[in-house]
Image (cartoon, rainbow, N blue to C red):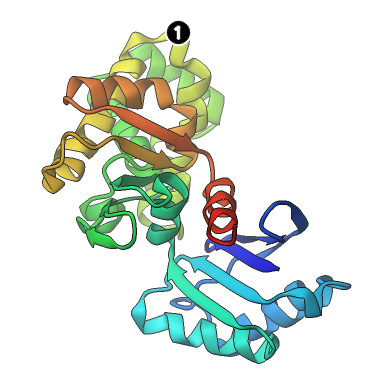
Amino acid sequence: MKLIADSGSTKTDWCLTDGSNVVWQHQTQGINPVHQKEETVKSILVKELYGNLSPHEQDVTEVYFYGAGCDEGHADDIRKILTGIFPHIAECEVNGDMLAAARALCGNKEGVACILGTGANSCLFNGNTIVANVPPLGYILGDEGSGAVLGKRFLNGIFKGSLPSELRDLFLQDSGLSYLEIIRKVYQEPMANRFLASLSLFIGKHLGDYPALESLLVDHFRDFIQKNVARYERQELPIHAVGSIAWHYRKQLEQAARTEGYTLGTVLKSPMEGLLAFHGHACS
């Protein structure tokens, strides 16, 4: 039995599979070793995971953990805790969320894998490992294609005039926010990236009524492709993407890819479906 985890800073999805069927599913709070101490991570895994795994605790033979912040410097920390909780397992693999996306989207084939959610990232995958990665740089310096940067572009457009003034008025009325309150949320309150990404809900709601929003989205994704995907110089490979922004705006992403001379491949809302297929194939 293989226990697979897809972890972000907010939540962690867990699936136990026998290679053909999902035997058990569960959700715990998010795990990110960059922001959480070892004791906190261990407490989450013991109380929220192991404490709810009954009667399958001893059935687990392999663990595959994919998470934000699980780079080479922190992977060993998570692996140590997991092997302490499951001392009988034969395999324990801990990897970052970019490899999760690559395996979920590309399987064992070569391709360009992208994460387009609150944040954004991309890589060139050779079917086994990540061979190139353009640094995302975060929503202040980069993160083109992300929900946070989409929200930033939207606010810039309604207040600087590249989007219709009626769209600005509608947003202020709908959100109940003023210009000064928006500035405060972005520059003085924590988690500004989440606030900016949340504006995608308004954009999606009014997308069909304003052609300018359609253009905003296509230009947003074209910028992502130009500054990230194009750097891999593999235009013959399909662009695969996972994440809420890619999922909800697939049409605009596909148009942007086509305009830039690329083909859009697989699009997933979350990587778990693809990870189950990847590890299921591996054990068959």
Circle 1: residue type: Asp
| Quadrant of the drawing holding the N terminus | bottom right
Task: Please tell me which residue is depicted at 35% across the width and 18% down the height of the picture.
Answer: 213
Q: Is residue 57 above or below residue 170?
A: below
From what the image shows, is residue 139 above or below residue 32? above
Q: Quadrant of residue 230?
A: top left
Query: Neighbour class for label 1 at 10 Å: few (<14), some, many (≥20)?
Result: few
Does residue 170 appear to the left or right of 187 in the view shown?
Answer: right
Helix or strand or loop: what does disc 1 sit on? helix
Position of the C terminus by quadrant: bottom right
Return the x and y of residue 207 as percentages of the image width and height.
44, 16
Residue 115 at what x, y percent from top left? 38, 47
Q: Is residue 146 visible?
A: yes
Which residue position holds label 1?
209
In the displayed structure, 42 sits above or below 185; it is below
Residue at the spot 38% in from the left edge and 58% down from the top edge = 98
- Choose between 40 and 65: the one closer to the eye: 65
- Which sits in the foreground, 277 or 173? 277
Residue drawn at 43 percent across, 77 percent down: 34
In the image, residue 203 lies at what x, y percent?
45, 24
In the picture, measured across the screen, residue 30 lies left or right of residue 195, that is: right
Q: Is residue 159 left or right of residue 193?
A: left
**Residue at (55% x, 58% y) in the render:** 279
**Location of residue 165 (image quadrant):** top left
Q: Residue furthest right?
A: 55
Query: Is any part of residue 184 visible from this angle?
Result: no
Image position, residue 66 (x, y; %): 50, 66
Quick one: 165 or 30, which is closer to the camera? 30
